[in-house]
Image (tube, rainbow, N blue to C red):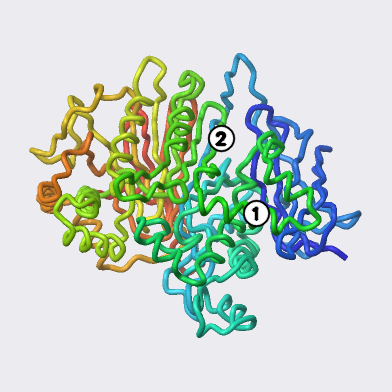
Amino acid sequence: MAGLRLGPLLRYVDWESGSTATVWVEASRPCTVEVRCADGASGASPTFSVAGHHYALVVVTGLTPGSTTAYEVLIGSRRVWPPDDTRLPPSTITTPSAATPESAGATPDGVRISFGSCRWASAPGGGHDPVGPDALVTLAARLAADPAAERPDVLLLLGDQVYADETSGATRRRLAARRDLSEPPGTEIADYEEYTYLYDESWRDPEVRWLLSTVPSCMIFDDHDVIDDWNTSAAWQRDMRATPWWHERIVSGLMSYWVHQHLGNLSPAELAADPVYAAVRASPDGTEELRRFAAETDADPARTRWSYQRVFGRVRLVMVDTRAARVLAEGERAMLDAEEAAWLRDAVLDDPSSYDHLLIGSSLPWLLPPLVHDAERWNAALCAGVRGQRWARFGEKLRRASDLEHWAAFPESFDRFTELLREAGSGPDAPATVCVLSGDVHHAYIAEPRWPNSDPGPDSTPGTDSAPASGGAPASRILQLTCSPVHNSIPRSIRAGFRFGWSRVGRRIGRLLSRHGRTGASPVTWHRAGGPWFGNQLMTLTLHGRKSALTLVQAKSNKQGAQLEAVLERSLTPESEAISGHSTEC
């Protein structure tokens, strides 16, 4: 008898019609999975098979726009979700009011988008968890306990949903039961079956399972979903491809990402047009079809686009792949290949009158502390040979040792992306805000760029003006919003380094590095508009009309258990710049 092995995860909710959603599940055996809603909406799908596992992405139709309806999952005539003994509320699907010509996609209550990255489901090793309460678990517990609490309309998970290279004690015991951990890759993940252990661990916590069943989610990978510093450089890639266990790791990593994360990012129309999805579903066993796709994608990343876009009323979200889409050849380095960059430009600039807020999800921050930015740009110049081969060899060692592989480490890509953001924020139809949402760096902060002829920010330093960009200052408020980790750690020495990176002395050191590397100036300067904040945390944007507000909460332990405490509440739009809560500047 088939049962529910993992899920359900509520993934896509259609904000145009308000009547369609997708629900992802893993069953224990081949079967047909049905989702049945209290308002009469429903959907059913046969499972597809990959490596002995059985999955379905059920398209639910007939939902009532502007409603919240409970749902259950059935296999055959037997209900498998919610569990009979659950103490948690019913899983629900909430739909926006249908768009009309008069509303132009607006919704009465706006949209709430929570985001973060970097989540150990369980700390590596075993025993005591040294990093404190998990922000996602704490959010789930609060929402389950208080039906009146404001829920996010969507949850953006911006990378490192699983850690293939830092496994927990429980996962290591499962690995040891099937292979010798003294042989490479040791306690890291080796193949597709072992990747399923990570998703089991990450999504089976009762509160998180319930949260993901009732709050739609959008996901994108970062490095630890495959391996730390994935695709740092061409030399890194050559070394990894010469490692005997690497091919199985990367193929399995891409396969498992496609199954567990990527499919749910797509709309029903995109799923229907996806040839890989069609081929896997048409086969009694889709393993080889998916392996072939993953191997070909690793060999030629340009053949696949992991990036995607979503629309939430008058809010446009563009999620960007900053890992697999890289061009690594030293003379041609780019964060995005030419086709991906063209797609991003079209997605960002198409019909700006149709949205009031533009969100770009990039797992890696665009704007870093200035010293870190200058160090990465300097390092990229060294690796390119600007100071000769001896410096180039030193630069490559430093790049890998210090994780110098963000946007700033791809200087031409950084400059083009910066100009794209300026264009998006300019003109008569410019949105109220353009926000780059990122994680990766295990702390939270707000950075605001300054173009020539715009007002200096509170942290600006004399003598840091850059060369003029190709146009004037934008009309939109453009921000880098960085939030991580959801559940992870950062050494005290790195905390101090990030703080120092914003300081005046740090900026001066950065300018010295720039001169040594002959990097030239960046097209913008920027100042720290908030933070840094350290802890397990989530940011939430509340977008209503052309107004935008930001909240940062952290998971803290107290006598009552884990609680979410507000650290920041701030308006991001010009109507009000007042700050409330416990915001601190450092």
| Number of the front mark, 1 or 2 | 1
Mark 1: few, some, or many residues within 10 Å (few <14, many ≥20)? some
The kind of residue on which mark 1 rests is Val
Q: Give the image location of residue 240, x and y in percent.
A: 43, 65
Q: Is residue 534 left or right of residue 57?
A: left
Q: Is residue 321 left or right of residue 11?
A: left
Visible residue check, residue 512: yes
Residue 478 vs residue 254, the one in the foreground: 254
Q: Quadrant of residue 209?
A: bottom right
Q: Is residue 461 left or right of residue 223?
A: left
Q: Is residue 51 left or right of residue 571?
A: right
Residue of label 2: 310
Q: Give the image location of residue 425, x and y in percent.
A: 36, 25
The kind of residue on which mark 2 rests is Arg
- Screen quadrant of the N terminus: bottom right
Residue at left offset 33%, top offset 54%: 405
Q: Quadrant of residue 313?
A: top right
Cα separation, mark 1 vs mark 2, equals 19 Å
Q: Of helix, strand and loop, which one carries label 1?
A: helix
Mark 2: few, some, or many residues within 10 Å (few <14, many ≥20)? some
Residue of label 1: 259
Residue at left offset 72%, top offset 54%: 25
Q: Which mark is residue 350?
A: none
Residue 351 vs residue 233, the one in the foreground: 233
Q: Give the image location of residue 94, x and y in percent.
A: 67, 39
Q: Is residue 240 above or below residue 314?
A: below
